Image (spheres, helix red, strand yellow):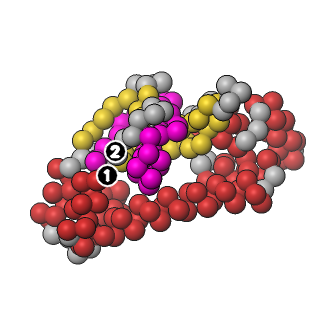
Amino acid sequence: MLDLEKIKRYLSLFTNLSIGDIYYLFTLVKEKKLKHGEVYLDVGVNSRKLAYIKSGLVRGYVVKQNGEEATLVLRSEDQFIASYDSILKNEKSRACYHAIEDTVLLEVDFDAIMDLIDKNPKYSAGRRYFFSNVAHDLLDRMEAFILLSPEERYQHFLSQNPSLARRIPDKYIASYLGITPVSLSRIRKRLAQKKK
């Protein structure tokens, strides 16, 4: 399922759990495979699933009134993906989430996990870990749009995701940064000239 180092890292969050507790957590997890381009969660669906990306890439986007797609999230290995509309507000998803390369997810029912945590506080570190990551991602993205220029946003994206730039189509990166593909190309040229 996961390599030993990742298992050790996640188990460090749950130092007070027994082997039986950990085994029970794994019984709730189901593996789901997505082909390149396959939709994981669609617009208008209230999905209470939470998925850990074992391998691959998932993009979440909305379609604006003018018909253009706006990329909201790009998630890769060791990150979580879910419809935040559904998970946080119990509403239908406004975004579509699809695989932009073959992807393997470890999926769990969010309500089952929350019920388990409510009944057994030993698991509460997992809830804190999940919600603190969601809050951190949202704040980081919001601050980037408020405080950084498009070029700085791109550099920040590269620093946070050094290997992803080669795996994600330029149009999705540009959309994620709130710029056009032409602007992204210009930014890359400027940065390349600065390195010379």
Q: Is residue 95 magenta?
A: yes
Report the residue at 44% width, 28% height from top: 39
- Which quadrant of the rendered structure holds the C terminus? top right
Report the residue at 41% width, 60% height from top: 130
Give residue 15's position: percent from left, percent from top.
Answer: 26, 73
Q: Is residue 138 left or right of residue 184?
A: left
- Which quadrant of the rendered structure holds the N terminus? top left
Give residue 116's position: percent from left, percent from top.
Answer: 22, 62
Q: Is residue 38 visible?
A: yes
Give residue 81's position: percent from left, percent from top.
Answer: 44, 46
Q: Is residue 166 visible?
A: no
* Tag 1 secondary structure: helix
Give residue 34's position: percent from left, percent from top.
Answer: 38, 29
* Tag 2 secondary structure: strand
Q: Is residue 70 left or right of residue 153?
A: left
Report the residue at 39% width, 40% height from top: 46
- Residue 49 has which mark? 2
Q: Is residue 64 magenta?
A: no
Label 1 amino acid?
Answer: Phe
Give, as a single range, the part of the protein colored magenta.
82-109
Q: Is residue 139 above or below residue 120?
A: above
Q: Which residue is mark 1?
A: 110
Label 2 amino acid?
Answer: Lys
Q: Is residue 112 left or right of residue 149?
A: left
